[in-house]
Amino acid sequence: MSTYLCFNIPQQGNINPTLAIVQGLITRGEQVTYYQTDTFRHPIEATGALFRGYISDLDVEQLTRWINGQSGPERLAVIGWQIIKECRQLLPQILETLPGHQRPTGIIYTPAALWGRLLAQILHIPAILVHPTYACNEYFQFCSLMHQSLPLTDVDKMGEHLAALNTQLHALCAMYQVPTFDFKDFLTHAEPLTLVTLPRAFQYAGETFDDRFNFVGPCLLPRYNAHDFPLQRLRTQPTLYISLGTAFTQQPDFYRTCIQAFACLPWQVVMAIGPHVPLAALGAPLPQNFIIHPEVPQLDVLAHSSIFIGQGGMNSTIEALSYGVPSIIIPRTQEQELTARRIVELELGVSLKPEQVTAALLRETVNYLAHQSGIRLRVRRMQRTIAETGGVHAAVDAILQHLHTRQPSSI
């Protein structure tokens, strides 16, 4: 039996794909210890993994909302300082918990969990990198694409911030006696085995990624017990599913606009509103054709849906495509704008700007998408492409094949 350590940032969108991979490894007889904050103890333990908690100051959802209104250089600076600060805080905690008699077989980590990469180098054990969103290389760099039109003053600020971040990162590497690298490398770095939970066909510049990158597609794990959700209501008429993911759910005005747009229409509307918006804030009485819950069994709902309205989070977008559902994307972050652009480029759906959304525009867009046979055909083709990637089974096979000759040894 091999043993793995798994590291991630405390954010649901990053954690969800890794949970399926972890459960897949455990099903094959492997052992996984997942380090994370207490908020995620239950879903981690539900996979069969050993949970190890730590103290973290990183609030990813709050950070995401804050940096969304900042300039490119300020976003880079804040993200960089937070990641390096988290490395300084977590590395001593994690190293203290490691058993002294056995070396783990491998470390699984996501790009933002830079401490996972450093721990693999500190312990001299192989690492597997998991990209829950777009991978980057010399042909596609997320930061470069989003900041390609920066004014010269911001370009200068970006250089200053990178220099300062490099000073801190080099000092951290020296502290743990590992090779130094620049902060800019943290997005473009690839391990000998790098798993990407997208199909290559959806990845920007997908054909330019070498054989270190294994595009295994979505690694799906049901996140909600559907036994108390009225799925039978989704079988009587076309279903429209609306969800803003987890980071931007405090949008009562948007939910009221959706109610105004689709009340009493021949659609069964399922709307996930998150934990922070009470039903009373949406007005009364609620339309009979709406099912509104804080959380819904997303995969089960998508299996019955005809159209999905979302914000462009990677997990939800790819899950919708996995079930052959075209999307209307209303992006709120830079990464979501990239996904909205990709959906439009590949003719898999439509993108709307948040500030332009009205009830009339939502109705018009849903009606347009419902009658676009060409879009539905391309979505079904992408659905087949995703099915062929292999998902969690392909990811676990790749990990086991990559590390099958390595055995635990004494530290």
Image (spheres, rainbow, N blue to C red):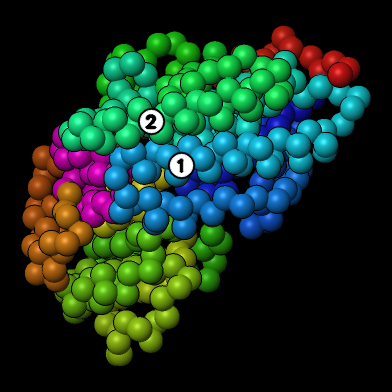
Q: Which residue is mark 2?
A: 160
Residue 175 located left or right of residue 243? right
Q: Assign the N terminus to one quadrant of the image.
A: top right
Q: Nearer the viewer, mark 2 or mark 1?
A: 2
Q: Amino acid at mark 2?
A: Glu
Q: Residue at x 72, y 9 (%)?
A: 405
Q: Alpha-carbon neighbours of circle 2 within 10 Å: few (<14), some, or many (≥20)? A: some
Residue toward you, 322 or 55: 55
Q: Which residues are magenta?
A: 326-350
Number of labelled discs? 2
- The x and y percentages for residue 326 are 23, 47
Residue 119 located left or right of residue 230? right
Tell me, yes or no, if residue 348 can be seen here. Answer: no
Q: Residue at x 9, y 69 (%)?
A: 360
Q: Alpha-carbon neighbours of circle 1 within 10 Å: few (<14), some, or many (≥20)? A: some
Check if residue 209 falls in the magenta segment: no
Q: Quadrant of residue 173?
A: top right
Give residue 332's mark: none
Q: Residue at x 26, y 51 (%)?
A: 331
Residue toward you, 95 or 69: 69
Picture layout, residue 406 above or below residue 89:
above
Q: Which residue is mark 1?
A: 79
Q: Amino acid at mark 1?
A: Ile
Q: Which mark is first along the chain, 1 or 2? A: 1
